[in-house]
Image (cartoon, grey):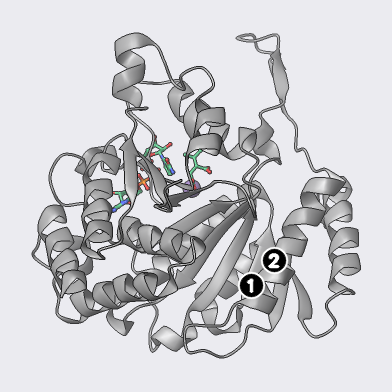
Amino acid sequence: MSLKKRIAIIPGDGIGQEVIPQAMKVLAATGIDLETTQFDWSADRYLADGVTVPPDGFTMLDRDFDAILIGAFGDPRVVTNIHAKEILLGMRFQMDLYANVRPVRLLDESLCPLKGIQPKDVDFVVIRENTEGVYGDVGGVFKKGTADEVAIQEDINTRKGVERVIRYAFEYCERHTKSDGTPRKRVLMSDKSNAMTHAGGLWQRVFKEIAGEYPQIKAEHMYVDALCMQLVRDPRQFDVIVTNNMFGDIITDLAAGLQGGLGMAASGNIHPGKTSMFEPVHGSAPPIAGKNIANPFGAILTAAMMLGHLGMLEKAAKIEAAVLEAIRQKRTTQDLGGALGTKETGDWVANWVAK
Ligand code: NAD
Ligand code: IPM
Ligand code: MN
């Protein structure tokens, strides 16, 4: 049997089709002998033959691959967003990738919109519950189209789902250091339990219970509205944050702003021991798609995160160092103040990695 890691690649829509080839080029430059297989699941494919995910697509990914690298899904021609829902949320839900790990790391002072904030000040991680919450899309519409219309969107929170993601956050805290090698020490759970008492109550009880099993880790809590303010006021105070699906989605776009924008943010959708999926945090960005201006660093750092997950820590660190060097030498796309295109930025990073 081959020991090569098998990677499924799904670029998707818009800038996903531009940034994923850069990430692949950088992966190739590491010299690791990966076996990659590309899939065309996207808006184009859906509009051509009506297929979002081919039959048994998720079973195939789980069975035949060690990891999945995807771009983004979303296309103005698919107004219902059905393909994104079936491919992206389908993968998260059906493959049970319950922990969405979104590191928030400032690579260079010049990228942070806050005054006087250094890279060491922004180095936290958001662990987002990834398989339930309002994303389950349970509910319905009653008296649709009338003045009496009722729309119900349920927020699903299971004991199992809440417990496993909170435990993941404590385990993550225990096993990971900050970028400077110092241990992580704190897990903060964020909710809206002052208003949403049923779901919030479950999160509160489970958090206290699991925190009790990790006495060496400081357990903290903040309501999500206050968290948004504190993330902007002083990001130094955060270490590991665990929260539900929707709050995690929102705060990680805010946190991407601290890192230099959506073009910088990486993520992994993880179920320990199973085939996991890696994607930049950003979307398909239709207005900038096809112009060779999208920042490929989020996708490249995502590929590094995937290598780290597969145990190739040195190669992952080398890719991160290359991105850092590109930023220092201003070999970047316009959003970071550089003058290079998506492809040329990818070339520069790949060349540095290959050296
Ligand atoms: P978006 O992330 O695509 O774009 C938000 C803003 O960030 C835009 O101004 C865009 O130009 C900028 N941006 C994003 N990525 C960038 C990059 N790599 N380089 C430079 N600038 C970048 O979010 P949106 O506009 O809200 O959504 C567009 C589409 O993408 C929608 O269909 C949405 O549903 C979808 N989406 C998909 C994913 C995903 O597949 N993981 C994530 C978010 C949004
Ligand atoms: C993300 C995206 C998705 C989400 C959308 C496209 C459904 O915003 O990955 O952050 O909300 O999870
Ligand atoms: Mn999002």
Can residue 130 be seen in this snapshot? yes
Check the image and report above or below for 171 versus 33.
below
**Nearer mark to the viewer, of 1 and 2:** 2
Check the image and report above or below for 208 versus 72.
below
How many numbered discs? Answer: 2
Q: Specify whether 30 is left or right of 265.
A: left
Q: Nearer the viewer, residue 12 or 337?
A: 12
Residue at the location (35% across, 27% down)? 42
Residue at the location (89% across, 54% down)? 201
Q: Nearer the viewer, residue 78 or 57?
A: 57
Q: Specify whether 354 is left or right of 170.
A: left
Query: Which mark sits nearer the N-terminus, 1 or 2?
Result: 2
Q: Are the two marked residues, 1 and 2, in contact with CB atoms closer than 8 angstroms? A: yes
Q: Secondary structure at mark 2?
A: helix
Farthest residue to the front: give it: 1
Q: CA distance from mark 1 to mark 2?
A: 7 Å
Residue indicated by mark 1: 240
Place of residue 142 in the rendered image (x, y in percent of width and height, measured from the top left): 72, 12
Q: Secondary structure at mark 1?
A: strand
Identify the amino acid type marked 1: Val
Can residue 85 be seen in this snapshot? no
Q: Point out which mark residue 169 bears.
A: 2
Q: Nearer the viewer, residue 310 or 121?
A: 310
Check the image and report above or below for 324 versus 52.
below
Task: Classify mark 1: residues with Cα within 10 Å, few (<14), some (14-19) or many (20+).
Answer: many
Question: Which quadrant holds residue 325?
Answer: bottom left
Place of residue 97 in the rendered image (x, y in percent of width and height, measured from the top left): 62, 45
Place of residue 181 in the rendered image (x, y in percent of width and height, measured from the top left): 52, 89
Identify the amino acid type marked 2: Ala
Q: Specify whether 24 is left or right of 345.
A: right
Question: Which quadrant holds residue 78?
Answer: top left
Check the image and report above or below for 347 versus 155.
below
